[in-house]
């Protein structure tokens, strides 16, 4: 804040600086602007001649940077052949920054420099990390960074050992580095046009990659709770709910996809029984916003494609590198529906009562996500001449920041790709956060009498 003497009024006049205007914004606005700045910086770096092997348009650079920062994985140009080593490293850096959260790095940097975090910054970090207590923001930021480095180091070492004999130490190390960052952050960027399809029968590659994106997708709050309380068997209700829900969703998806694709000659029918199990498992867990594929996505049956839409829409855990409406939201809505059908006044989950405000938040998040999805599908069907299922798949994949594609993304018009850019940003920031950013809610002091309306 700067004070200048005003000779007309004989008083000091207070001038708000740009930095103060920035901090005066709402937490979602600060988070959104931070991500936009990161995307624009990445776009400029990708436009440099040293970043590509062939000229890149502004829209292609913006799309790629957005896809990396939002850890989506949708691409309009092949990552492995169109970008140089420098360009690929820029993409990896954008993935890491977007995956762990721009605010995490900001908090860590401020603490490392001995700076005090103001209330505005704390609220922004709180919004980014999904924490209800401001006191836990710094602690959570440190844990996120530490856990990420440890898990990614283990993944890097295992993948390097796996690919050493096939690719040589130097190439194996680089591929391990890129794929570890891409997998743990649920980005889905690959160095080959066919993703991980050549490794459909590799137990090591399937196991390491799926472990990385499942761990990254269950949420750092769960990882922190597991590390802190596993010895005392005092896991929080949220941790137990996320773990059980993730296990059951993955197992059900595994058997359903195996059953649906068992007779498909373009996917599982030509594989051995063991390879079928591996491919079905990978295809079951990758829609949880991972984005890699070991089967040709555009060759899946229509039933599997529709089922995959549901898996992508659900997504991963809160405070994770995954997106979607989140596992907790999905489970709470299921339990709320169950409670209503059983004529119960309270929504209970794992012998605990779910607060009505939490049920409303889950409902609002889902409704906003569905509205954005419908609007995007409607807009794309107006602008693009493409199959409806392909359009719906790309829209849900973008909004849930999954990155799986049926091959339509690269064929979309400039307007269509712009729609996907907006969806990726909205999906990463969270539809509820986006709604807060567009219209900050205000509490009404007036209470109205109740009335009954017809529903259903």
Image (cartoon, rainbow, N blue to C red):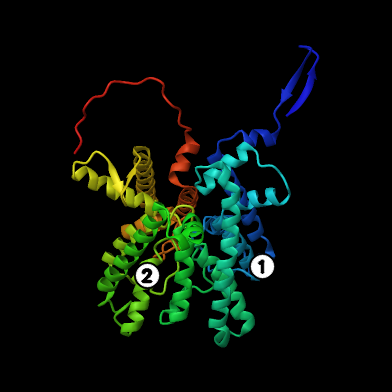
Q: Which residue is mark 2?
A: 283
How dense is the environment of label 1, judged by Cα within 10 Å: few (below 14), some, or many (20 and up)?
A: some
**Secondary structure at numbered mark 1:** helix
437 w.r.t. 187: above or below: above
Choose top left, top right, bottom left or bottom right for residue 167: bottom right
Pick the quarter of the image with the C terminus.
top left
Q: What residue is shown at x 43% (from left), y 77% (from top)?
A: 197
Q: What residue is shown at x 36% (from left), y 44% (from top)?
A: 362
Residue 86's tag is 1
Question: Toward the viewer: 270 or 360?
Answer: 360
Residue farthest to the top, as pictured: 9
199 w.r.t. 365: above or below: below
Residue 49 as seen in the image, left or right of residue 393:
right
Kindly tell me whether residue 28 is visible in this rendering: yes
Question: Toward the viewer: 168 or 225?
Answer: 225
- Which x, y percent locates residue 255? 28, 71
């Amino acid at each position: 804040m700067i004070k200048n003497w005003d000779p007309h009024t004989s008083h000091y006049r207070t001038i708000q600086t740009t930095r103060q205007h920035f901090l005066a914004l709402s937490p979602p606005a600060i988070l959104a602007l931070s991500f936009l700045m990161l995307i624009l910086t990445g776009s400029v770096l990708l436009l440099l001649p040293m970043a590509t092997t062939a000229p890149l348009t502004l829209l292609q650079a913006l799309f790629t940077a957005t896809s990396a920062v939002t850890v989506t994985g949708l691409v309009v140009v092949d990552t492995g052949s169109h970008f140089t080593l420098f360009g690929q490293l820029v993409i990896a850096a954008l993935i890491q920054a977007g995956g762990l959260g721009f605010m995490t790095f900001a908090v860590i940097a401020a603490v490392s420099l001995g700076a005090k975090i103001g209330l505005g910054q704390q609220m922004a970090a709180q919004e980014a990390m999904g924490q209800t207590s401001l006191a836990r923001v710094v602690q959570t930021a440190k844990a996120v960074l530490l856990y990420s480095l440890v898990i990614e180091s283990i993944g890097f070492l295992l993948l390097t050992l796996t690919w050493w004999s096939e690719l040589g130490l130097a190439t194996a190390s680089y591929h391990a580095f890129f794929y570890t960052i891409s997998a743990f952050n649920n980005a889905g960027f690959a160095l080959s046009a066919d993703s991980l399809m050549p490794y459909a029968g590799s137990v090591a590659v399937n196991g390491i990659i799926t472990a990385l994106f499942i761990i990254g997708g269950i949420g750092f709050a769960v990882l922190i709770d597991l590390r802190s309380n596993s010895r005392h068997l005092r896991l929080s209700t949220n941790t137990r709910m996320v773990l059980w829900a993730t296990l059951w969703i993955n197992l059900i998806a595994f058997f359903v996809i195996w059953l649906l694709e068992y007779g498909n000659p373009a996917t599982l029918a030509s594989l051995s029984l063991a390879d079928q199990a591996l491919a079905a498992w990978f295809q079951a867990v990758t829609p949880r916003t991972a984005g890699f594929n070991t089967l040709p996505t555009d060759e899946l049956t229509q039933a599997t494609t529709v089922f995959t839409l549901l898996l992508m829409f659900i997504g991963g855990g809160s405070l994770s590198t995954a997106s979607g409406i989140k596992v907790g939201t999905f489970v709470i809505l299921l339990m709320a529906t169950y409670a209503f059908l059983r004529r119960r006044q309270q929504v209970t989950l794992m012998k605990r009562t779910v607060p009505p405000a939490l049920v409303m938040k889950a409902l609002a998040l889902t409704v906003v996500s569905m509205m954005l999805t419908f609007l995007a599908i409607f807009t794309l069907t107006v602008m693009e001449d493409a199959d409806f299922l392909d359009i719906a798949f790309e829209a849900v994949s973008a909004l849930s920041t999954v990155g799986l594609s049926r091959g339509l993304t690269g064929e979309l018009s400039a307007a269509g790709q712009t729609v996907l850019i907006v969806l990726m940003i909205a999906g990463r920031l969270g539809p509820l956060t986006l709604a807060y950013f567009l219209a900050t809610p205000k509490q009404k002091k007036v209470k109205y009498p109740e009335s009954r309306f017809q529903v259903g």
